Amino acid sequence: MRFPSSAFGLLLLFSAMLWSPRALAQNVPEPSTHVIIPNPTPRPPDLKEELEKGSKGEQEQKALSLKGQLRAREIWLESNQILLLAQQLQQEINSGKKNPAPLSQDAAKVAQIEKLARSVQENMKAQ
């Protein structure tokens, strides 16, 4: 059986297109450019977590220590301020026999002393 030349030409053209290197290259995936290297020194994940927890624990302990020191300093300053105000008030009362001082100033100092005393008491409870 003989093919007509046009049918044979079409068949040759079709097979050439089907088996061309370009057509074959479209079906083949390109090689990956990323190289995956396994971890050369694998460590257990728990070790990393323990190291992080240890540093966090130390940081928390330092922060608590600093907080305590600041609170103690604040208590000391307020206590000194109470002592100073009380001494001034006592001097004014003792000298008041000679020169009567206005009671509003004395009442303001007493109120400030009470306020500082409450603040010191609250700070000492927090410790």
Image (cartoon, helix red, strand yellow):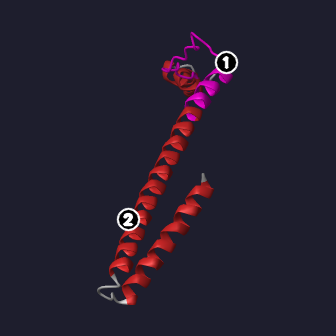
Asked whether residue 43 is drawn in magenta, I would say yes
**Which residue shows up at 63% across the image and 27% down it?**
49
Q: Is residue 110 left or right of residue 49?
A: left
Tell me what residue is drawn at x 55 percent, y 43 percent.
64
Pointer 2 residue: 84
Residue 41: % across, % down: 58, 10
- Badge 2 crowding class, 10 Å Cα cut-off, few under 14, some 14 to 19, many 20 or more, is few
Q: Secondary structure at mark 1?
A: loop
User: Measured along the vertical axis of the image, is residue 54 above or below residue 114?
Assistant: above
Label 1: few (<14), some (14–19) or many (≥20) C-alpha neighbours in 10 Å = few
As rendered, which of 125 and 62 lies closer to the eye? 125
Give coordinates of residue 36: x percent, y percent.
55, 17
Name which residue type carries label 1. Pro
User: Which residue, as the protein is rendered here, is positioned at the far left?
Assistant: 99
Q: Residue at x 30, y 85 (%)?
A: 98
Give the mark count: 2
Q: Any mark on residue 44, and which?
A: 1
Whether the magenta-drawn stretch holds residue 98 is answered as: no
Q: In the displayed orientation, state which residue is furthest to the top.
A: 40
Q: Quadrant of residue 106?
A: bottom left
Image quadrant assignment for residue 57: top right
**Residue 58 sits above or below residue 22 on the image:** below
- Mark 2: which amino acid? Leu
* Residue 11 versus residue 69 in the image, above or below: above
Question: Magenta span covers which residues?
Answer: 28-56
Q: Measured from the top left, where is residue 121 in percent x and y? A: 58, 62
- N-term mark: 1 or 2: 1
Across and down, in percent, residue 108 comes to: 41, 82
Front-most of residues 66 and 32: 66
